[in-house]
Image (cartoon, rainbow, N blue to C red):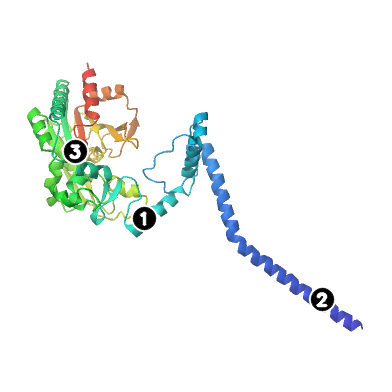
Amino acid sequence: MDKRVEKDHAELEAAARVSLSAERAFLKSLTFARLPIFGCAGFIAFLFLANLWNFAVERDWPKLRIRSASPLAGVAKPKPAPWTLDAFLSGETQKAVSANLGRMSPVFPISVRAKNQLVFSLFGGSAAPGVAIGRNGQLYEQLYIDEFCARDGGFDPSRLGAWSSTLRDIQDMAQAHGKSFVYLISPSKAARYAEDLPKSAPCAARAMTMPEKLAPYRAALDEAHVRYVDGPALVAAQIPKQAIALFPRGGSHWNSVGGALAMREVTRAIPASPIGVLDFTSAPAPEAVGADRDLLDLLNLLWPDAHYPTAAIGRAGEKGDCARVPRLLALGGSFLHQVLAAATLAPCPPQIDYWFYMRTENNTIELGHYRRPPGDASNGERLPPTSEQLEENLAGADVVLLEENEAGIATTTQVAHLIEALRRLP
């Protein structure tokens, strides 16, 4: 009897162990099955807390924000949410808060890049506003395509006359104050490399036979005896001579060689140039950087390909024997960046005050002021873009360089700003 009890007890213990083992196995499998749920819940909680943190520190301690390792290019900073009763009742406050929180999320950049990569890889399209993909992978800014395709050969004679007369007045006033003045026309990629425009461009079929826009402007400058450098004509003449295109595949602006060619002509045009006459060397660059990939960066892809032909420039010869550091005042748009970078290689590298006119998202003009010490090819130090600063720069300048792109020639803000500043000089 005792043996039977012992046997039954042993069997019960064995059954209990099997049951316990099965229960543990079930709980373990259940835990593993729920791991994705726990992971998703944890990730959502992290995003929620990260967004709250970013929202809390955004205004007063922006450096403490949790950021993506690769921030998006060309994305405007979110505007502050309007905290008024009318804005709240209309839903404007809620909409702004929602958009701001979404952009503050650490995963926002990679989400945008993933979507843009999908559009680019599967459909060969651009998900970036204002960036168009042309033939052979060439990238263009849509605004330059629109301007080029709208050319019909017409012009306003009264506007043209007033423009060239103003430039002549600027030149005379600058010379009266002991300064040299040069006007620069910079080129448009859409106009100079029209053969690669997107097939969707309105003028793609007739791109190579479009009317010549600049002829009357050149004639007006010649008639007014304005000293100028014709960037579009320079590029057109150099295209067959250059092994590397003067506009890079992923960029909107001319490359460093294009900018250096223009700066060389500027120094040649200045009588007894205090900067000296620029000479430079060039060689293929291993990878596109900076302005040579500005449109590629705006595509915000996961895997951007920046290995396409572009060039780098260097100094040819030694520095000159400079009695003092010359000062260059430059007013214009983004095409001046490569021109001014080349100026740092001149025999007497100047101190450069660069007044940068940039069109914003709402089609207004934002003005920036940067100062580069001699030999500095970067943007330099940002300074206040005040009228007083412009007058001070102008008073101390040896050379004044004014630039307009052919797409907006005779319509830009810098011409009026410059003559107004000259008129205020004693």
- Residue type at mark 1: give it: Val
Residue under numbered circle 2: 12
**Local secondary structure at mark 2:** helix
Residue under numbered circle 3: 406
The reply to whether callout 3 and callout 2 are in contact (CB within 8 Å) is no
The answer to which of marks 3 and 2 sits earlier in the sequence is: 2
Which quadrant would the C terminus be assigned to in this image?
top left
Instruction: Please give the name of the residue rendered at 41% of the width and 54% of the height, measured from the top-left corner.
Output: 114
Q: Residues within 10 Å of mark 1 (few under 14, many from 20)?
A: some
Identify the mark at residue 119; answer none if there is no mark: 1
Q: Position of residue 388 (x, y in %)?
A: 30, 21
In space, the residues marked 1 and 3 are separated at their CA atoms by 32 Å
Q: Position of residue 260 (x, y in %)?
A: 19, 42
Dot in front, 1 or 2 = 1
In space, the residues marked 1 and 2 are separated at their CA atoms by 65 Å
Q: Residues within 10 Å of mark 2 (few under 14, many from 20)?
A: few
In space, the residues marked 3 and 2 are separated at their CA atoms by 95 Å
Q: How many marks?
A: 3
Check the image and name the residue furthest to the left: 223
- Residue type at mark 3: give it: Glu
Q: Position of residue 139 (x, y in %)?
A: 27, 50
